[in-house]
Image (cartoon, coloured by chain):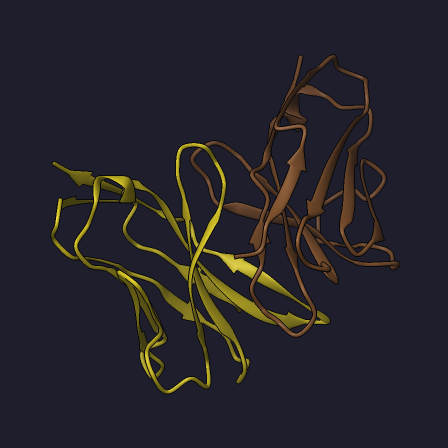
Chain colours: A brown, B yellow
Amino acid sequence: GAVVSQHPSRVICKSGTSVKIECRSLDFQATTMFWYRQFPKQSLMLMATSNEGSKATYEQGVEKDKFLINHASLTLSTLTVTSAHPEDSSFYICSASGAGTDTQYFGPGTRLTVL
Amino acid sequence: AQKITQTQPGMFVQEKEAVTLDCTYDTSDQSYGLFWYKQPSSGEMIFLIYQGSYDEQNATEGRYSLNFQKARKSANLVISASQLGDSAMYFCAMRVASGTYKYIFGTGTRLKVLA
């Protein structure tokens, strides 16, 4: 299957700092990338969808000024959590899909802990 | 409303036995896709199997098969010959068209394979 990487896999930061998470499709061109958030023992919650070169579409209730998403190329999307607070601590997972396919391939996730 | 329902929070199965994980869905779309993903304790989401709404045959991928009953709006995952490595969280997801398409996930079923 297609390979998607995420970096970093784990990050601990102080409250008030910003954290950037990268999502890369390694062996295919990702026309669409998705960012999810997962709380412990819960399902994935879609935060936003981004198409290469376009502004991300955010789900209802997700603050676009807090969770900045950039999809600058067909292989890279970034999620920046700005002015992170402890309630932003979570597991963040990206996924990517290529043109002409419905299947999303997921990255390994990033565990964010805000102190 | 578009929704995925997984009614089994946890399941046990004896090694080498088959197990069925339930998934029902609700959508008014005529065209949709149904997916199953496995999430081991490491957190990565592993794609298992896909069923399109117009596919007449049930999807199969190795030990995984999808029991698709369109009239009942169910898409159950059958794992045959369970292995200890199958112990994980399993999520059913539905691709819906909403401008750009997106996935809706169920709440998941935790499967434990017993030796």
Q: Quadrant of the C terminus of chain B?
A: top left
Q: Nearer the viewer, residue B25 or A13?
A: A13
| Marker count (numbered) | 0
Looking at the image, the residue that sits furthest to the front is A27
Residue B30: % across, % down: 53, 85
Q: Residue at x 28, y 40 (%)?
A: B85
Residue B7: % across, % down: 30, 54
Q: Splitting the image into 4 quarters, where does residue B66 fall?
A: bottom left
Q: Splitting the image into 4 quarters, where does residue A12 fall?
A: top right
Vertical comparison of B37 with B15: above or below: below
Q: Nearer the viewer, residue B28 or B94?
A: B94
Q: Residue at x 81, y 54 (%)?
A: A56
Q: Residue at x 35, y 74 (%)?
A: B59
Residue B8: % across, % down: 27, 51
**Does residue B72 appear to the left or right of A47 in the view shown?**
left
**Does residue B21 appear to the left or right of B44 in the view shown?**
left
Residue B75: % across, % down: 34, 69
**Does residue B69 appear to the left or right of B28 in the view shown?**
left
Q: Residue at x 52, y 80 (%)?
A: B28
**Does residue A57 appear to the left or right of B113 in the view shown?**
right
